Every structure is written in structure tokens, then in C-alpha cells.
Image (spheres, rainbow, N blue to C red):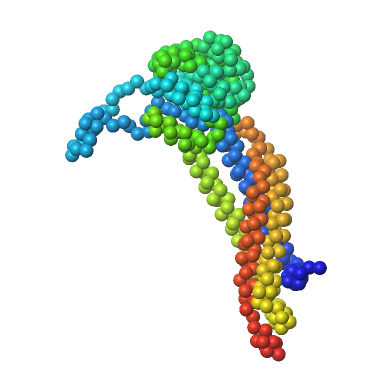
Amino acid sequence: MLPLPLSIALRHLSRRRRQTLVSVLGVALGVGFFIGISALMRGFQTYFVAQVIDVAPHVTIKDEYRTPREQPAVLAMAGGAVSVRGVKPREELRGIRDARGMLAWLEQQPGVAAAPGLRGSALLRYGARDVTATIAGIEPARERRVGNIEKDIIAGSLDDLRATANGIIVGIGLAERLGAARGDTITGTAPSGASLSFKIVGVVATGIASIDNGEAYVLLKVSQVLQDRPNVINAIRIRLDDVRQAEPLARRIEAAFGWRTESWEEANRNVLSLFVIQNAIMFSVVGAILLVAAFGIYSIISTVVHEKVRDIAILKSLGFTEGDIMRVFTIEGVAVGVAGALLGAVVGEGIIFALGQVRFEQAGGLIRGNQGFILARELWPYLAGGAFAILASAVAALIPARRAAALNPVEIVRGAA
């Protein structure tokens, strides 16, 4: 046996089936699109962050300063009424000084792995084809601890760098641009004028086009020879057990040693800020859909209140209080919201399934290796979309419900008479 207010509310809705169905569908479409769009956007965002965390280091120490160091002339006149102009920065040999001490300090930190490297540009030549690339000098034993390049190698292995004289591992896109394959010999020329012959011992496919199309890996010592920078490193790459500690650790390192230190959040801040804008657009669009559906609920309940004024007067004469009357019409709005939320979950599942069937040709760009939409299956969009739909429906029903509760039964009966 249903409670009397609920029974009356359902009877009102059942008498206006067409309008009720339209309102329920409006709410369901809003919830369904929210679930579908959320799965699409969150899937891409989660995949991108996972790729960045998987491929790139969590923290990178560079051989530069965040702000130029003050010149001796400025320090000598500190606090004085003197303006120093036209002082050229002192020429310094680029490279991280006391790198061994920094590495020893980093390796003493819990949950931290670090690897030195020397990165520099070079012109790679194979036959008559020239391609500019970034050559990263690495130590394979340390690199295994800070990066996942080894699992992304699709031909050869990381150990081949040591087993082959002047071995080089190239990105898959870079190999395609050169027209070379594993086993081929290419020539690398650095801006310093030094030139070396390399044998391709591996091909790597990370899924990040900027890496696959423009990076190659050699032994650290080989990179130092090519760049004519013996015993110099210009980057220390760090990987953490807890990626959430990347930003605090970066600030600690920079404060202690002075070198510019970037966490993965800072390095990808522009892209992460775009995700915030994407989410804001998604919530705005879906909110507009649910707002239109809420107006439909408002219209239904307002019409029911107008048509049922005599019924309201009779109910009040029988002892129904204003709270009871208000509860009846609020239940109507909430019932439409609940029905729309449940149907919206089904619609959302259908949208996710349909998006999962879409296939498209790879067009390169930022991320490679996917031939369909990346979808995230999470519970919170269902809960959030349903809760917002029910809340919007309840608010839409509240105004006509309060008007119904405020009706005077005596005036209604007199008017009818």
C-alpha cells in the first residue's frame, strides 16, 4: 500500500502521460549525454596523464636557473641608490655542477630514483635524407628505474646500446622520416661540428608523437662525445613511487640546489588547464539540457496545480495541511527526476557503447596507437548526473508546490459556487 501523498502524486502524473513522458525523456537525455561526454573527456584526460606519467619523468632537473642570477655589480651595490645597466651575463659552461653529489642526495630520499642525462640536438642523415632530432644520452641501468622506455621498444632492446658500438634507439616516427630500420647505419652531426656514425639497434613507440617523431637514445658517454661536452650532464630525471609528491619534491630540490626543477604537473600545466576548460564546457552544456528539462517539469506541475485547485480545496477540507499539499506536488517533480535519472543511466550506457564502436584512421598528432575513442567507465558521472537531475526536478517542482499549498480552500469553493 503506497503512502497517500505518493499515490496522489503518481495519479496526477499518470493522467498526463504525454507531458510526463516528454519531461522524463528530457531529464534522461541530459543525464545520458552527461555520462557519455564525461566518459569521452575523462577517458582522454586519464589516458593523457597516464601516458605522461608513464613516459616522461616525474621531476626533471635542468642546467638552468628559473630567474637569471644577479650580477656581481648589482650585488656590490645592493641597497644603494645606484642603477646598473648594460651588464652582460657572465659566460658559463652549461651543465649541472656537482651532479654526483645531487645524485647521491636524491638516491638517499625514500621512494626516489634518479638518472643523469645529456640531451642535445643533432642532424641525423640516412642516405640523402636529413632529419633534425633530439639525442638523449642515458645510462641503461639507471634509465630502467626512471623511465619505461624498455617496455615501449618494439624492435631490439635497451641492452643493445652497450652491446653495439655507437648504438642508437630511435622513435618509430623518426625512423619512418629517415626511411631507416633496425640494423641500418646513420650519421649524426651535432651543432659543435662533431660527427659520429650510429647503428640503429632499436625502435621505440611510446604513443606520444612528439617523442616518437623527434627523439633518439644513445649511451651517455657517446652523447658527450657527439656534443663535445665530456663529463657533462644537463638533466637529471627523477621517478617517484608516489607521483603526488612530484611538485613538493621539485620545490625542495630547487630551493636546495638552485637549478630549475620542473614536476610533470608544471611541464604540462597548459594542457592540464585545458582539461579544466573542457570540464567547464561539459558541465555548462549538460546543465543547460537539464535546465530545459526542469522547465518542462515546472510546466507540468503548474498545469496540474491549475487543474486541481478544487481537488486541493477538498484535500484541505479533509484535513491535509499545507505541508501535505506541498509534499504531494514536490513528490511529482522528484518522481520525474528519479525516472529520468534511471532512464538516463541506460541512455548513457547506450552512448558509451555507440562511441566505443567508432573507428577512425590514425591521423598522427599528439597521441598515436589508438583507432577509437578512449572511454573511461567511472561510477561518479552516474551518481552526479542523477543527483543533479533529481535536484533540478525538485527545485522546478518547488515553486508550483508552494503555490498549491498556499491556496485558500474557502475562496476556491466560493468561486466554484
Identify the residue at horizontal 50%, vertical 43% (top origin): 273
Q: Quadrant of the C terminus?
A: bottom right
Identify the residue at horizontal 58%, vertical 17% (top origin): 158
- Asked whether residue 268 is in view, the answer is no
Residue 107, image x, y percentages: 49, 24
- Asked whether residue 55 is in view, the answer is yes
Task: From this view, report whether residue 39 is shown above or below residue 71.
Answer: below
Identify the residue at horizontal 43%, vertical 35% (top origin): 251
Task: From this view, report whether residue 398 is shown above or below residue 129.
Answer: below
Residue extending farthest to the left is 81
Residue 371, image x, y percentages: 65, 35
Nearer the observer, 332 or 178: 332
Residue 184 quadrant: top right
Identify the residue at horizontal 64%, vertical 57% (top origin): 387
Residue 154 quadrant: top right
Task: From this view, report whether residue 124 is shown above or below residue 24.
Answer: above
Apparent side of residue 358 relative to residue 167 in the rendered image (left or right): right
Apparent side of residue 97 relative to residue 393 in the rendered image (left or right): left
Q: Quadrant of the N terminus?
A: bottom right
